[in-house]
């Protein structure tokens, strides 16, 4: 009873005093590829990365705040000993960013502020950090400017990226952005110093055709020919309700000789355009267009967007170029190599690499689907990752960590399986051994393959019940030690199913439709797992919504109840995140693995404390005791569990009892009285405990 009382206190304190974090980022497993040991293997990586330099840990050094437009996720790399080190603690404290990110100190307090997208305009967050506490407060949403008859919205399309710099050299930041048709650049001048006598956010549109630049297409830009070009653009407003709005321009500006040159990418182009400025800041003059930048090795990326930061620590701003799209239409971009580093050398730029920071992480390209599975039959769990391109990557486990051994495990791509590979592990053929399954999407509908472990060959599963967008999941929903099969539909509904073989094909039998009733709880999830977070036999559901926020629910009386997410997991991880349970360090706790849309993997360690975890001097735990016939057993070693009556007769037996898993034992009504529960481990240790069933 003493143990049970302590257990109840731990459970109560976890709920009532739940301010401390039971989860922390984990990076204690080394990963190697052909280039060596990865510096940031578990960062989750990224696809389309807008890079901003800003001091986020208040050490006087500029860190990198990376915003992935595809995932809509912020990622932080702090500067340490002239290296870039992934920092989750800083990342999770940052505000939510939408579509684009720029940081500039608009109020002159020495701290860079945030500019990001909002509906048809700009949202501004002032940096109010103090000491070591990062904080931003909203000061404009949307940002306004002075019009002819009062304040109007300062328009920037959500598909665009503007320039926010002191363009006219008067001491405050101005804004350059394309007008709604996407042909000319407008100057929104900040008049705060002139009018308010202090730095601030007072804007007026001073030029509807800044620089006399008129954009037509990827290889046609008009300079100094007026801003009304027949067939291209007219400064005279069109009142037609059917006027075509532009679909995307990414602007950037950099200064070497005291005035700003322009870099430009367009949604329909794969070149980066450079327009040098031979005038001044206050009077720009553009007379030449370089349609292929840089000259020696031009960028070839769709919808190229450029950021500037000193990433090689030589005190010169380098250029970082990435696609600016919000998706990867027809998989035309290799998202393993989608951030080009152009090194600056006193005004000129030279291509250095196309996978800046991505090369320091696990990165399989796009939409990583990781599982742990013994892929080489050596007795330990390897890391396998499916991706959007129809591949399965293999990282073999060794004594120091993981080593990349294949980007096409068991020749999976030869099956032409389609795209968007989702891996799962479960006993598909019900032979008592977990199988590796790969579900993919193709023009013929969902395809399912299972790995034959004896021959290391994939076999196609003939079935017709899976729908486009379905996910196949395997979880122990009733804590009996066996994995059940679930289907997560695109709608968010979950069905508990059973696979039945009929001839040479398989059919799905739905045992419980709308399992858990999750959508009615507001849990429309793109992925979820069930874990025994405290080892006590109470299931916890951790799921990811469409934006990448982790949601949490507890199972109480066979119903799910939403609760507050643990602070350690409170972060926006982005779109298309997949969750898996793992055990990172053999401490008997369920840990968490995330596959990200950036093609990477993140690990989180369960640091929960409970009487189950803290009491390690027993071979097994048994609770509650006395019991009404349902109780839990948790063993620290594999073995066989027996329940014996007072005469020594075996009344119940379960072989291959797992270690470090709380298993629910359900006895029938004939069990009444005193019994002994006995554990015989694989190495011959024996332990027994009395249980009372009134």
Image (cartoon, rainbow, N blue to C red):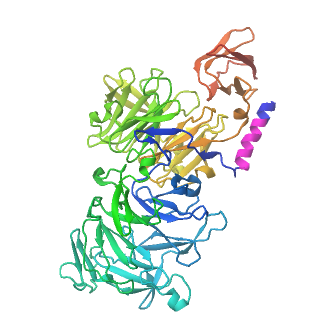
Magenta stretch? 6-17
- What residue appears at the point 36 percent right and 67 percent down from the top-left corner? 159
Residue 54 is a magenta residue: no
Could you tell me residue 37's position as x and y percent?
Answer: 47, 41
- Which quadrant of the structure image shows residue 265? bottom left
**In this image, 198 relative to 175: left or right?**
right
Looking at the rendered image, the quarter that the C terminus falls into is: top right
Residue closer to the observer: 666 or 305? 305
Looking at the image, is 103 positioned above or below residue 320?
below
| Residue 450 appears in the figure | yes
189 relative position to 88: left or right: left
Q: Nearer the viewer, residue 588 or 313?
A: 313
Q: What x and y, as percent, mark residue 634?
A: 66, 27
> Chief secondary structure of the magenta span?
helix
Q: Residue furthest left?
A: 231
| Residue 9 painted magenta | yes
Q: Quadrant of the N terminus?
A: top right
Count of numbered marks: 0
For this rendering, which residue is in front, 191 or 81? 81
- Residue at x-position 62% and y-position 45%: 23
On the image, which quarter does residue 94 sit in?
A: bottom right
Residue farthest along the right direction in this orientation: 2
- Is residue 491 among what the camera can see? no
Residue 96 location, x and y as percent? 52, 62
Percent position of residue 599, x then y: 41, 47
**Residue at 39% across, 26% down:** 500
């Amino acid at each position: 009873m003493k143990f049970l009382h302590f257990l109840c206190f731990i459970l109560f304190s976890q709920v009532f005093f739940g301010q401390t974090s039971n989860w922390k980022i984990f990076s204690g497993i080394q990963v190697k590829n052909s280039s060596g040991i990865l510096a940031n293997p578990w960062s989750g990586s990224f696809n389309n990365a807008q890079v901003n330099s800003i001091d986020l840990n208040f050490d006087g050094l500029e860190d990198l705040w990376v915003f992935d437009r595809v995932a809509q996720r912020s990622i932080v790399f702090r500067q340490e000993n002239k290296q870039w080190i992934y920092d989750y603690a800083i990342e999770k404290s940052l505000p939510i960013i939408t579509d684009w990110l720029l940081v500039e100190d608009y109020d002159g307090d020495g701290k860079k502020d945030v500019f990001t997208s909002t509906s048809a305009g700009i949202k501004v967050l002032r940096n109010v950090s103090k000491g070591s506490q990062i904080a931003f407060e909203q000061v404009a949403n949307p940002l306004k400017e002075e019009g002819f008859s009062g304040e109007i919205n300062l328009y920037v399309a959500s598909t665009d990226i503007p320039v926010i710099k002191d363009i006219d050299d008067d001491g405050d930041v101005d804004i350059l952005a394309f007008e709604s048709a996407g042909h000319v650049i407008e100057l929104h001048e900040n008049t705060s110093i002139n009018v308010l006598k202090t730095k601030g956010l007072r804007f007026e549109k001073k030029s509807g055709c800044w620089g006399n630049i008129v954009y037509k297409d990827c290889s046609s830009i008009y300079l100094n020919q007026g801003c009304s070009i027949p067939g291209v653009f007219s400064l005279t407003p069109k009142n037609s309700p059917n006027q075509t709005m532009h679909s995307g321009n990414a602007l950037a500006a950099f200064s070497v000789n005291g005035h700003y040159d322009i870099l430009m990418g367009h949604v329909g182009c794969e070149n980066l355009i450079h327009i040098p400025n031979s005038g001044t800041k206050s009077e720009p003059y553009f007379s030449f267009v370089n349609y292929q930048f840089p000259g020696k090795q031009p960028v070839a990326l769709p919808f190229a967007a450029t950021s500037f930061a000193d990433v090689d620590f030589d005190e010169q701003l380098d250029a970082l170029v990435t696609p600016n799209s919000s998706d990867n239409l027809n998989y035309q971009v290799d998202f393993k190599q989608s951030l080009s580093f152009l090194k600056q050398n006193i005004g000129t730029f030279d291509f250095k690499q196309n996978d800046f920071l991505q090369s320091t992480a696990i990165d399989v390209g796009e939409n990583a689907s990781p599982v742990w599975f013994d892929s080489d039959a050596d007795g330990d769990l390897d890391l396998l990752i499916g991706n959007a391109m129809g591949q399965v990557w293999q990282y073999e486990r060794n004594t120091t960590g993981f080593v990349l051994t294949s980007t096409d495990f068991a020749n999976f791509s030869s099956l032409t399986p389609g795209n968007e590979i989702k891996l799962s592990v479960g006993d598909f053929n019900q032979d008592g051994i977990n199988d590796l399954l790969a579900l993919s999407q193709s023009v013929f509908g969902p395809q399912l393959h299972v790995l034959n472990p004896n021959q290391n060959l994939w076999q196609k599963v003939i079935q017709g019940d899976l729908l486009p967008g379905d996910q196949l999941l395997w979880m122990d929903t009733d804590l009996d030690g066996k994995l059940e099969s679930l289907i997560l539909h695109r709608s968010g509904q979950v069905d508990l199913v059973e696979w039945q073989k009929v001839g040479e094909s398989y059919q799905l039998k739905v045992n419980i439709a709308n399992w858990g009733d999750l959508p009615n709880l507001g849990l429309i999830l793109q992925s979820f797992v069930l874990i025994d977070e405290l080892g006590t036999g109470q299931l916890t559901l951790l799921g990811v919504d469409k934006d990448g926020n982790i949601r949490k629910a507890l199972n109480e009386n066979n119903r799910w109840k939403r609760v507050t997410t643990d602070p350690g997991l409170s972060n926006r991880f982005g779109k298309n995140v997949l969750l898996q349970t793992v055990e990172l360090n053999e401490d008997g706790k369920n840990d968490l693995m995330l596959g990200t849309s950036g093609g990477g993997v993140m690990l989180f360690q369960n640091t929960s404390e409970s009487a189950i975890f803290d009491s390690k001097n027993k071979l097994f735990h048994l609770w509650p005791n006395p019991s009404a016939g349902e109780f839990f057993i948790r063993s620290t070693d594999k073995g066989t569990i027996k329940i014996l009556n007072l005469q020594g007769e075996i009344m119940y037996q379960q072989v291959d009892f797992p270690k470090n898993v709380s298993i629910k034992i359900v006895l029938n009504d004939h069990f009444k009285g005193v019994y002994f529960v006995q554990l015989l481990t694989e190495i011959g240790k024996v332990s027994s405990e009395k249980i009372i069933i009134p």
